[in-house]
Amino acid sequence: MTVDTGAEAQLEPSRPQSSLSTAAARNLATTTKSAPQMQEITSRWLLRMLPWVETKGGAYRVNRRLSYTVGDGRIEFVQDGATVRVIPRELGELALLRGFEDVDVLTALAGRCEQREFRAGEVLVERGTPAEKIHLIAHGRISQTSAGKYGDEIAVAVLADGEQFGENALLDADARWDYTATAETSGVLLTLSRDDFASVLSSAPSLQAHIQDFSSLPLQRQNKHGEAEIAMSAGHVGEYELPGAFVDYELKPREYELSVAQTVLKVHTRVADLYNGPMNQTEEQLRLTIEALRERQEYELINNREFGLLHNADFKQRIQTHSGPPTPDDLDELLCRRRGTKLLLAHPRTIAAIGREFNARGLYPDHVDLGGQAVPAWRGVPILPCGKIPISKDNTSSVIAMRTGEENQGVIGLRQTGLPEEYEPGLSVRFMGISEQAIISYLVTTYYSAAVLVPDALGVLENVQIARRRD
């Protein structure tokens, strides 16, 4: 039996065709088509998990109990080649100088700071030795360790860029280090000695007055969170005179205004009129446009400098990994900073790094069900992917932990519904007219923001090393 092959057909070009070709037959066939696809679409877990609060008037005010803030921010530096200098006004982030605004004096203090470069493994201060300087970390990671109750070495903290240690040394002549600070990486820090601080203080009456006022701050009774204390009595007997109390509020609470993402969708009338079967061209164009807007909305909720989660986490709720990669110990440290953590958000590559650390220790994370989908979890808290969390050039990223909901004093999403020509909750599609070129225009708009009701509702594990280590 002779088998007709493609090769033989090429050798016999003059052989007559005995049936209709597939290329010609396709002209009469009906084509099955998919809807337009879009690679940018992600799971958008943040938008799905945030409780959305109706925000009338376009703003949401977060009223809090009065707190006495004594400086707990991070310090910024400027670099000129190999020379690093602290920005004078940034010294106001120190508790001792919070609220002090004499730029000339701050500049004089900044000029007294001495640059010191350190290498990995170098011991910067030793426990028990006199503390004579404050250390401002411009770049690098420093671990603090101390002696435990039973004589073993215990980890106290891990500090990184913008943080400082040893502030009490500036005023206390008898101060001693109660921990050992060791460099985990190479880096640069600036030091200000007690003698240099005293020299500037002696010639600056404004600073002397500020220090005198600062010394009275501990007299303001406050709880461990820095909030104004509510006086009360407990355990008394008899006709004890009860203290009077009231709850004081912040006089200038923060207001979150709704942000906006907009675009103008344009569709030619010829396309809308003639090419609408089997799919509505305008509807498909609008569907993909809305998907892109929602992706941008989630990006802004993570990264916006005004209301984004990464920029609004309280400095006391930002922690560093102990060794670089995201270990179970680091996740436990992140979870213990707040009650009722609802979810963890991380870049997919960070989640892969978490899995590697679990595998290396023989641990297998649980899975929880979210809307019928099984997702990995740690201590019962789901770990959800979010590709909008940035990865730095040195392959480090962040893990976000949050408690959600107004009733839980957590993180909430803000939006306003009932908009004119609303297409989805908080998103409107408004007809803008037809141009002389026969192009139909639609204004697609969504309004949104996010609010952190109390500082411990949101935490961030920073500088998470996600690159695979060489064995």
Image (spheres, grey):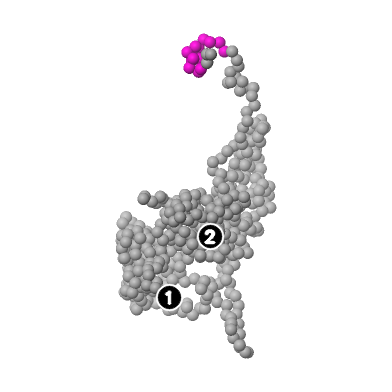
Viewed as shown, does residue 50 lie left or right of 150?
Answer: right
Q: Percent x, y for residue 443?
A: 62, 44
Q: Nearer the viewer, residue 18 or 297?
A: 18
Give amino acid for label 2.
Arg
Residue at image mark 1: 210
Up/down of 403 relative to 105, above or below: above
Q: Quadrant of residue 49?
A: bottom right
* Residue segment shown in magenta: 5-17
> Which of the numbered marks, if any, corresponds to residue 379?
2
Residue appearing at x 37%, y 72% in the figure: 151
Which of the pair 438/430 is nearer the observer?
430
Element class at badge 2: loop
Residue 276 position within the rendered picture, expressed as x and y whole percent measured from the top left: 66, 33
The picture places residue 300, in percent across and down from the top left corner, at: 53, 52
Residue depicted at 51% across the width and 65% down the height: 337
Q: Is 307 or 234 nearer to us in this picture?
A: 234
Where does the image place residue 220, in percent across and percent down from the top left? 51, 78
The residue at the point 57 percent across, 71 percent down is 65
Query: On the picture, is 193 further left or further right than 34?
Result: left
Query: Residue at (40%, 66%) from the top-left corner?
Result: 155
Q: Is residue 12 magenta?
A: yes
